[in-house]
Structure formats: structure tokens, C-alpha cells
Amino acid sequence: MAENARNLSEEPAFRSKSIKYWALDDRPREKMLLKGSEALSDAELLAIILGSGSQSESAVELSKRILGSVGYDVAELSRLYPADLMKFKGVGEAKAINIVAALELGKRRQKNDGLKRKVISQSSHAFEILQPMLADRPYEEFWIITLSRANKVKRLHCVGEGGVEGTVADPKKIFRMALDDYASNIILCHNHPSGNLKPSDSDIKLTQKCVEAGKVLDLRVMDHIIVGQTGYYSFADNGMI
């Protein structure tokens, strides 16, 4: 009986469930050491973060199942909360937190890369800074970028948070933050979780209101950027400021 159990464990179907039985070149950690992180698929990278799978599937198989649930879109994966990830068999609280933390670190790296530019001379420069922060949010957030007279970035401020359909931004709060930074110029920005980049009537009215208020305060509203997952809408580029 023991001999039969031992033989069963050596069957290919059993080996496929455990990474330790795979060829050395197919194991994610060893593969990274041999070929570098660029050689790994998204599933293999996720498997390294998970560390292990379950009794019924390897970490790579579990990773493929998780990625498959979001259409193999890493951006969509980054929108999941720990509770969403814990719905998958084999993912406990610790593994779920590891995944969310790793993806958040990637977002912050992108944000820091954008901030290194520091001087904004066109809408795409602002988008590079905003996209890592806002593109994957499941609800709307309204931010401003405060700038010096030479358009050097001073600070980024979150002005308000809302729901999936919209958020409320108070012009008084916007300009108070800008004045506190001794800013000369500002860029308004918010995200559209729906992916529809067309500005709403309330977006247009708020922008016009802020532009007029900025003239009184000698504080120019340079642009209003609407951020989506893969692109953006610029009021300035479209002649709306």
C-alpha cells in the first residue's frame, strides 16, 4: 500500500501540482535567477509573491486563475482589495496583503518616476504623474497639482473623494491649498473609473468657475486633466481653457 502511494506521487499528474517537481528552468524563483525578472510571465511573477499554492494547484496555476478573473490585466488586478483576493482558494489574508502591497509599490515607483520631471510643459507630463495614482481607482478622486511660475511641481493635493459616478470638489478648498503652497499655476485633475474620458457638464462648469476665480487671484488654471486607465482628456489641448 505504501509502495502504491509512493508510485502515485511520482506520476506526472501529481508532479504538475507542485513546483518543486518541475524542471529547474520552469520554477519562477530559479528562472528569475537564471534569466532575470524580464523573462518571467505575469503569472510567474505573481506566483513568487504568493510563495505557494494549495494542495490542488501550484502557485503558478493559482496565479493564472487569479489573473484570468481580471482578463489577465495587471491594471485590473491592482484594483482588487485583499477581501477580493481572499475569495480564491489558496489565498489567505497574508498572501492577499502581499499582492496588494507589491502592486502599490509598483504604482508608487511610477509616480516617483513622473515626479522626477518636476517641470510640466504639456498635458502628457501631467498625465505621467497622475496615471499611477488615479487610473486604477474604483471611485472618483479630485486632485490638484500646484506649480511655480516656471511650472515646476510644488505639491500634489487630494481635494475630494467620491463614488463611481462622481466627486465633489470645492473651489474654496482648491485655491486655499494653492495659496498655501504659494503657487502661481495649478492643474485640476480627476479620474473617470468608467473609462469614459468625455467631461461631464459638472466638470465643465467647475473648470470654468475655477478659471474665473484664478484670474481674480492671479493664479492661472493651466489645465484640467481627466484620467482613464489607458489615456486622458486635456481641457487645454481641446481648447476648453
Image (cartoon, helix red, strand yellow):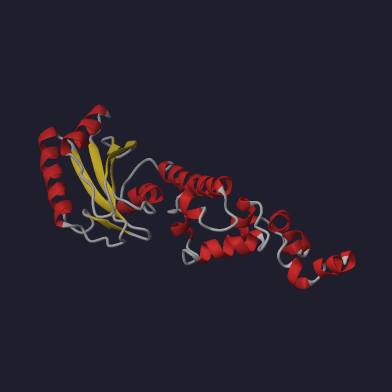
Residue 175 placed where, x, y %?
A: 19, 34
Q: Nearer the viewer, residue 44 or 208?
A: 44
Can you say whether 105 is above or below 5 in the image? above
Can you see residue 212?
yes
**How many marks are shown on the rendered structure?**
0
- Left or right for 88, reference 33: left
Q: Residue furthest front?
A: 1
- Left or right for 63, reference 205: right
Q: Residue furthest right?
A: 3
Residue lying at 32% horizontally and 56% vertically, measured from the top left: 193
Residue lying at 20% horizontally and 34% vertically, measured from the top left: 173
- Left or right for 192, reference 220: right
State the image quarter where residue 35 is shown: bottom right
Q: Residue furthest bottom?
A: 12
Q: Nearer the viewer, residue 22 or 147?
A: 22
Residue 57 placed where, x, y %?
A: 66, 63
Residue lying at 77% horizontally and 72% vertically, measured from the top left: 12
Can you see residue 41?
no
Q: Quadrant of the N terminus?
A: bottom right
Residue lying at 65% horizontally and 57% vertically, measured from the top left: 53
Residue 195 placed where, x, y %?
A: 31, 61
Residue 164 placed where, x, y %?
A: 28, 54
